[in-house]
Amino acid sequence: AQSVTQLGSHVSVSEGALVLLRCNYSSSVPPYLFWYVQYPNQGLQLLLKYTSAATLVKGINGFEAEFKKSETSFHLTKPSAHMSDAAEYFCAPLLNEKLTFGTGTRLTIIP
Amino acid sequence: GAVVSQHPSWVICKSGTSVKIECRSLDFQATTMFWYRQFPKQSLMLMATSNEGSKATYEQGVEKDKFLINHASLTLSTLTVTSAHPEDSSFYICSASKGGVMNTEAFFGQGTRLTVV
């Protein structure tokens, strides 16, 4: 069955530290993959997307993600966390022409 | 850039009444729009996919008679929650795609928080 898994429902990092949010997908064919960010009581904003071009994708706000077919992963990283990065992050592969959202990871930044 | 506007951003209604939520693509034509429901601290669950001028396609378990979706134009889709009950209270989010069933990007509205009392 096609699915997506986000390991870690909550991640806390210190301001200035590396951010790593994990996402693994399950699909017989590598799908398009998206990372979205959601601030409280708001909709979703696209951070970045993988559409079978470059495996290392750079997004907004200093985020990037690397598609690794062998690991079926698309982890999101940012070298240095900022307080404004505190939010909910969703990984979403495009499966059967539909965005399938992971359970989300709440990122907390420690001052 | 592509902007999707949802209205209202929040609404409180009495049990048994109906509520309509609008989703508009402000600067592009959206062939396809999607409606999601999000419970507190949970992920987004796709409710239905609507294509302009045709009936919406509902996901398994979503009552089509309760959640009426209309996509009358390329810039507007509406979700009507009929005979709302407290268990319908949730955050509803729409998204719109520029081309095909899903172009390589969907643009999301800011969401509507529905509270049924």
Image (tube, coloured by chain):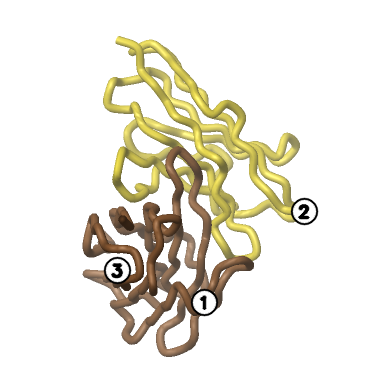
Chain colours: A yellow, B brown
Determine the residue positioned at 55% across, 77% down: B57
Residue B92: % across, % down? 38, 58
According to the picture, the residue beneath numbered tag 3 turns out to be B21
Q: Give the crowd class for mark 2: few <14, some 14-19, many >=20 residues within 10 Å.
A: few
Give the numbered dot on residue B64.
Answer: 1
Tell me the quadrant of the picture where the C terminus of chain A can be found. top left
Q: Are marks 2 and 1 on the same chain?
A: no
Q: Marks 3 and 2, how far apart in space? A: 33 Å
Where A47 sits versus B10, above or below?
A: above
According to the picture, the residue beneath numbered tag 2 turns out to be A1
User: Which of the two labelled residues, at mark 3 and mark 1, occupies the earlier sequence position?
Assistant: 3
Q: Do the residues labelled 2 and 1 touch (CB within 8 Å)?
A: no
Determine the residue positioned at 45% across, 56% down: B87
Q: Which of A99 and B90 is in front in this view?
A: B90
What's the chain of the residue with tag 2?
A: A
In this rendering, position of residue B69 left or right of residue B64: left
The quarter of the displayed image where residue A15 is located: top left
Q: Do labels 3 and 1 share a chain?
A: yes
